[in-house]
Image (tube, grey):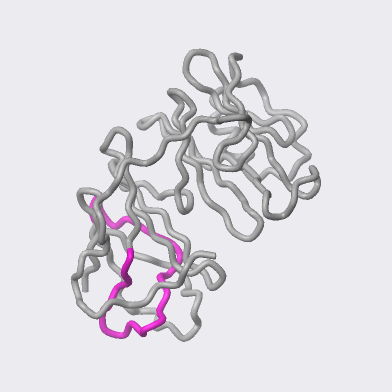
Amino acid sequence: MRPLWSVVTAVGLFAATAQAQPQQWTLPSAGLLHGSKATIENQPCCGPSRNTRVHSPDNAALAKWSGMASRDGRILMLKLADNRTLKLTDCDDKTGCEADDTRIHRLVDWWPQHRLYVVLVGLYEESVAYLVSERDGRTFVATAPPVLSPSGRQAVALVSNLMSGVDLEIIDLSRNPPTSIKVETMPDCSGAGPNSFLRPIPVWTDETHVTFEGESPLPEDKPNTKQLLRVEGGKGQWQC
């Protein structure tokens, strides 16, 4: 379970307390990728999806990016360079996996600008997102499916709920490879309480500012409390 945040007392303190670090881009090894069943095969992808009786909320993404990704039942296939295919295989109690080994893979999007796939990975009680490089299948784990800035040069990923707490991540896509950093503080504008939550939907208002919309996980949170994050150079700063 992700830890809950506490609110900082200094207005305007940089949200990130450490420098952004290059992500560990990982290839499948011994049939596993970040705990998922995964292989890279020397065969082209991707034909029409089939055997999709499996609950598959990625149908819209698969239709939109036909030729780049497809599904064969519980196997999600992603097209890689040089006529190769990354296969991600779902694993849950119906396929004999224990609860703590659950991995359900659903395509969210394909970012042609960055040659990256975004895959939502459902775990037993939580979820994460994989960013998968089309170049070679290397993958790193994000907090949640990231939301791109208008230019696509940066993104934010957010989880904010009572079970998982608050986990906010800034991803700098202008770097090669991209870097990410966790935002370790909460906004401290007027009206924020000591145990406030971020509203769960990050929305870019321009290239450098993100607001948070939707209903707070805490009913007692004041809905008009300002939650504005300035994002620049891979770092974030709360503004009041």
Residue that appears at 26% across and 84% down: 190
Query: Do we see residue 69 in this rendering?
Result: no
| 199 inside magenta stretch | yes
Relative to the observer, which residue lies in front, 236 or 225? Answer: 236
What secondary structure is the magenta-colored segment mainly? loop
Relative to the observer, which residue lies in front, 3 or 45? Answer: 3
Quarter assignment of residue 72: top right
> How many labels were placed on the picture?
0
Above or below residue 175? Residue 230 is below
Say whether residue 208 is left or right of residue 140: left
- Which image quarter holds the C terminus? bottom left
Task: Point out residue 101 in the picture as x, y percentages from the top left corner.
Answer: 67, 49
Check the image and name the residue furthest to the front. Answer: 30
- Which image quarter holds the N terminus? bottom right
Residue that appears at 35% across and 31% down: 113
Above or below residue 27? Residue 230 is below
Residue that appears at 60% across and 40% down: 60
Residue that appears at 61% across and 14% down: 43
| 113 inside magenta stretch | no
Task: Point out residue 26 in the picture as x, y percentages from the top left corner.
Answer: 47, 34
Magenta residues (range):
184-208
Quarter assignment of residue 77: top right
Above or below residue 89? Residue 14 is below
Query: Do we see residue 4 in this rendering?
Result: yes
Relative to the observer, which residue lies in front, 215 or 122? Answer: 122
Say whether residue 209 is left or right of residue 168: left
Task: Point out residue 230 in the picture as x, y percentages from the top left corner.
Answer: 23, 60
Task: Point out residue 91 in the picture as x, y percentages from the top left corner.
Answer: 71, 43
Say whether residue 171 is left or right of residue 33: left
